[in-house]
Image (cartoon, rainbow, N blue to C red):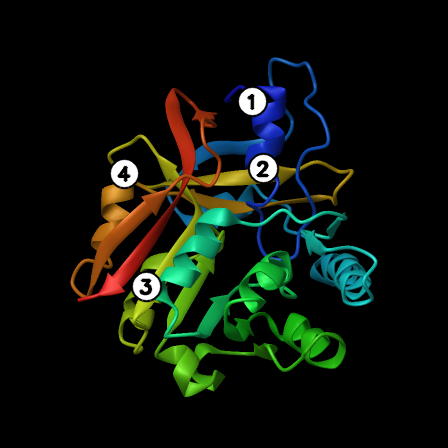
């Protein structure tokens, strides 16, 4: 089993890499040779990894994220990430820079696939709204969508059950994939599907990669102070993943969401990376 990275690096790294709507993964690093939480294993199939995972209570997660998102809406915090409230601005600067670069004039229309209840939107809205007219469209699981429509939808923020339901200008604009590809059972079929949409740009953010010639399926275990859960998670070979986009998209830029941090995985090094893709 892998050892965990150092205390501060791990807190920075793991803060935002769980599936949509989950709490911060680490409060502190335990001093132990064999960690209880993080990423483990090298499974041949997603189903094998599932057999070694416990899953999670999606209703419990939704309730935590909902409470935090409503607190943000009421002005009690600036934004939430994985149900953790932030009282000060903490912009995602690489994402903001990319969105400003690719906006159509002063208008930004995007589809945020797996965007929970608007974590990225609320985190960056004040900086972007001063410069752009925003149409931020989230595609999520049914119970997140219903909650978002009821509690959080606005002139800028909208919720949908599928990409096909989103407004045409958003489907011709930008697709945001932030910490989501590694939690799909078949990310490659998903990539194939979205390439046949009309997106001009795709942003891959906070995505897990591995120093290996092949992709790897692990099980991610979450500390119980967050919630009791474990679930499969991919670590991708960088060239293999980007190769699935190469027939229709060029890589315009790459960026490091967690500079200087890595995850040891049984003798291999994992890390998180972001890319801006533009249609050829």
- The reply to whether callout 4 and callout 3 are in contact (CB within 8 Å) is no
Image depth: mark 4 or mark 3 in front: 3
Number of numbered markers: 4
Q: Residue at x 39, y 79 (%)?
A: 171
Q: Residue at x 45, y 26 (%)?
A: 260
Image depth: mark 2 or mark 1 in front: 2
Image depth: mark 4 or mark 2 in front: 2
Image depth: mark 1 or mark 4 in front: 1
Secondary structure beneath label 1 = loop
Of label 1 and label 4, which has the lower sequence position?
1
Of label 2 and label 3, which has the lower sequence position?
2
- Residue neighbourhood size for the residue with mark 2, other residues' Cα within 10 Å, grouped as few (<14), some (14–19), many (≥20): some
User: Which residue was labeled with disc 2?
Assistant: 14
Q: Nearer the viewer, residue 115 or 97?
A: 97
Label 3 and label 1: CA atoms lie apart by: 31 Å
Label 4 and label 3: CA atoms lie apart by: 17 Å
Left or right for 50, reference 280: right
Q: Is residue 134 above or below residue 221?
A: below
Q: Is residue 177 above or below residue 54?
A: below
Label 2 and label 1: CA atoms lie apart by: 11 Å
The label number, if any, that marks residue 191 in the structure image: 3
- Residue neighbourhood size for the residue with mark 3, other residues' Cα within 10 Å, grouped as few (<14), some (14–19), many (≥20): some
Of label 2 and label 1, which has the lower sequence position?
1
Q: x and y percent of residue 172 in the render?
A: 34, 79
Q: x and y percent of residue 263 in the render?
A: 47, 28
């Amino acid at each position: 089993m892998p050892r965990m990275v150092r205390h501060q690096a791990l807190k920075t790294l793991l803060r935002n890499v769980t599936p949509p709507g989950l709490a911060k993964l680490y409060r502190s690093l335990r001093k132990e040779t064999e960690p209880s939480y993080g990423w483990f294993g090298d499974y041949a199939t997603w189903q094998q990894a599932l057999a070694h995972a416990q899953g999670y209570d999606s209703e419990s997660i939704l309730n935590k994220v909902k409470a935090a998102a409503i607190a943000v809406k009421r002005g009690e915090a600036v934004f939430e990430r994985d149900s953790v409230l932030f009282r000060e601005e903490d912009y995602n600067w690489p994402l903001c820079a990319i969105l400003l670069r690719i906006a159509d004039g002063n208008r930004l229309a995007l589809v945020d696939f797996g965007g929970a209840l608007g974590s990225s939107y609320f985190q960056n809205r004040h900086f972007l709204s001063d410069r752009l007219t925003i149409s931020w469209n989230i595609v999520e699981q049914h119970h997140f969508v219903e909650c978002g429509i009821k509690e959080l939808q606005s002139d800028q923020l909208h919720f949908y059950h599928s990409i096909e339901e989103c407004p045409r200008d958003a489907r011709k604009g930008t697709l945001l994939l932030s910490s989501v590809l590694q939690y799909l059972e078949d990310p490659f079929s998903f990539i194939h599907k979205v390439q046949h949409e009309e997106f001009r740009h795709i942003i891959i953010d906070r995505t897990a990669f591995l120093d290996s010639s092949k992709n790897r399926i692990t099980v991610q275990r979450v500390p119980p102070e967050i919630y009791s859960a474990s679930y499969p998670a991919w670590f991708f070979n960088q060239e293999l993943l980007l190769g699935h986009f190469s027939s229709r998209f060029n890589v315009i830029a790459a960026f490091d969401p967690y500079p200087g941090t890595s995850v040891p995985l049984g003798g291999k090094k994992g890390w998180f990376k972001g890319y801006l893709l533009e249609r050829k």
